[in-house]
Image (cartoon, rainbow, N blue to C red):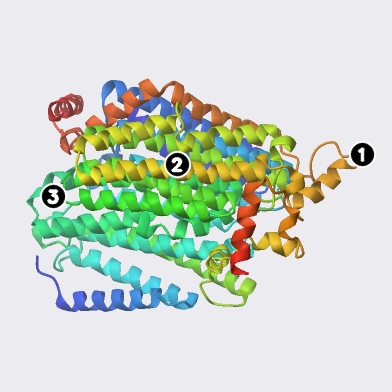
Amino acid sequence: MTVSLVLVVVMAALIACGVYLLLERSLTRVVLGFLLLGNGVNLLILIMGGPAGFAPIYDESLDPAAYNDPLPQALILTAIVITFAVSAFLLALIYRSWRLANADDVADDADDVALRAGTVTMPLEEVAPDAGDTDFPVEDAEPMRADAAGEGTR
Amino acid sequence: MMAALVSLVVLVPLLAAALTLVLGRRARPQRIVAALALTAVLGISVALLIGVDAEGAVVVEAANWGLLGIVLVVDRLSALMLVVSSLVLLAVLIFSIGQGLADGDDETPVSIYYPTYLILTTGVMVAFVAGDLFNLYVGFEILLVASYVLITLGGTRSRIRAGVTYVIVSLLSSILFLAAIGMVYGALGTVNLAQVAERVDDLPFDVQVLLHVMLLVAFGIKAAVFPLSFWLPDSYPSAPAPVTAAFAGLLTKIGVYAIIRLETVIFPTPELNPALMVVALLTMVVGALGAVAQADIKRILSFTLVSHIGYMILGVALGTVAGTAAAIYYIVHHIVVQTTLFLAAGLVEREAGSTSITRIGGLLVSAPLVAVLFFIPALNLGGIPPFSGFIGKLGLFQATAVQGDALAYALIGGGALVSLLTLYALVRVWNLAFWRPADDVEGDETRLLRAVEEAPDQPTTTETRATPRLMTLSTAGMVAVGLALTVFAGPLYALADRAAQNLDGPGAYIAVVLGDDARSAGETAGETTGEADR
């Protein structure tokens, strides 16, 4: 299979930039990365269709081998539509995220942060700040255990 | 006749989605249309399962484009998945209708909920009947785009935060999948599953492994297999309860379904199986440990979901008929039970006002029915005999023991340990949320709510959060289905076994799809190939 080197280089550049941007924490860059990545992959499918040829519109005088392969183009069209719709949704999502949080970042999961800090029993302490250990009946093992975990990191 | 049914299973939810969208803000007709459509889909799926099981797989070439165009294939595995998923989708729909009715639909924009839910259904159905890789991709995209909307429903801060992670990770997996499709086409000149399976042996080994791994990673993200599972417990719990239930039950299983197709039809080669088994073990253990560490019911359930994906991957990784059959039975069991547990968690949320087990208690007394509805599927998921979870795990362990090397025994040990850990995590929920007397909970909502309850003219529970009968009913229905999986385990396991025999090597699948001379002859040939391969 012969392919155009320029197309391959462009595809590689698009995908490389796309991956780089996708790894950023800023959501706007993530969207740009997704767009580049999507276009890069569409180009990849086009390259997989083989060398350039005539437009795949039926013409009796042409040798079938002279046509460009139409199937990848059909696939790309579908993929473009999907990418378009998803990008629109993603933009709306990011706008909403910016409106709500006033930040253009991928936010950390609150529960993960709590878990990392060892304060997973936080809500308990938050609601009742002066609840001492003695408030739990001694025979009730589970809350004791949970509270002990909180105690250890306090 | 059967061919028409295959098209209908996709068309009915799609047209119903359009209809509900047109109906716009009129909630009542929307509900009726959605419920009728899903009931119809369930009926069609059951008819398909019966027909396919009796007469062999059905192939539909849409608009007579032949194998170049859209090919829909329903074999036993697809048909079984169709039935289970439409059943679960219907139950969740009824649950959400109940919730919507009770809440007066002011919390979520209802005009978009039903159409999106039906689109999700369409995507699920397309993914299960797809006969080529690209159609599978389109199915994935349909259901994913619908899921993006559902997971961010209402656009609250926590949902947007969780939604962003979910959307970006899903997009990455879709892009990987699309790139893999491009490469498959470049290497083989086709994306039809049967043709790919037929031609893939001619490829050099390194190209095969490259394509295999790319597809596996793309599906692995969707299935939440261990190193690729981090997004799931982060994003699922923040969605509305019914949405989480449907996602948890179905979406990851579609990834597992795709992996089964990949491992049995396209690459039935054993090279990657040991690696898959290690990944399965890690998925189980890491997921279970995550579940033990959490303090919120929805998050605990999300982690058990990840951990139990490991069991299914184990069954697939064995590469034997017994392994695949066990995996298929386990998928059916897990779809039902996991959805039921999330629905029960939704009921808990309504009864207690929270799903954090450090903040709620005494539900056994205040809501005994919810307690029962949680307890049965919890034991089922933990694999207590005689429930279906036990049967599924037993089948998996038996199939694994046949392999008999150190890795296999490590997996059996790990699997047993993980089922204990799952049980531990769920018993912890039981002890704290249900069994613990409400008085033991410090400064919690339950106490405040109880104060409301004890007011003379307030008969039942909380601030308008009385649990609608429809919600309890649909959860109870799902619990009953879970029990039926145990009671009818014999016929069901036999069906899973027959489905797995069709998947023993690509021969049967290729014969069904490509057997051109006479379709019916091709089907019988497919059946006999399946028998012979065994």
Quadrant of the image for the C terminus of chain B?
A: top left
Label 1 neighbour load within 10 Å: few <14, some 14-19, many 20+: few
Residue type (three-letter) at the residue carrying disc 2: Leu
- Lower sequence index among marks 3 and 2: 3
Judged by depth in the image, the label closer to the viewer, 3 or 1, is 1
Residue B41 left/right relative to A110: left
Disc 1: host chain: B
Q: Which residue is mark 3?
A: B200
How far is mark 2 from mark 1, CA to CA?
45 Å
Residue B267 in percent (x, y) is at 18, 47
Q: Secondary structure at mark 2?
A: helix
How far is mark 3 from mark 2, CA to CA?
41 Å
Label 3 neighbour load within 10 Å: few <14, some 14-19, many 20+: some
Q: Is residue B59 above or below residue B26?
A: above
Q: Residue at x 54, y 53 (%)?
A: B299
Q: Which residue is mark 1?
A: B456
Q: Is residue B71 visible?
A: no
How far is mark 3 from mark 1, CA to CA?
74 Å
Residue B468 left/right relative to B222: right
- Lower sequence index among marks 2 and 1: 2
Residue B394, located in which quarter of the rendered image? top left
Q: Residue at x 53, y 69 (%)?
A: A108
Q: Are marks 3 and 2 on the same chain?
A: yes
Q: Which residue is mark 2?
A: B420
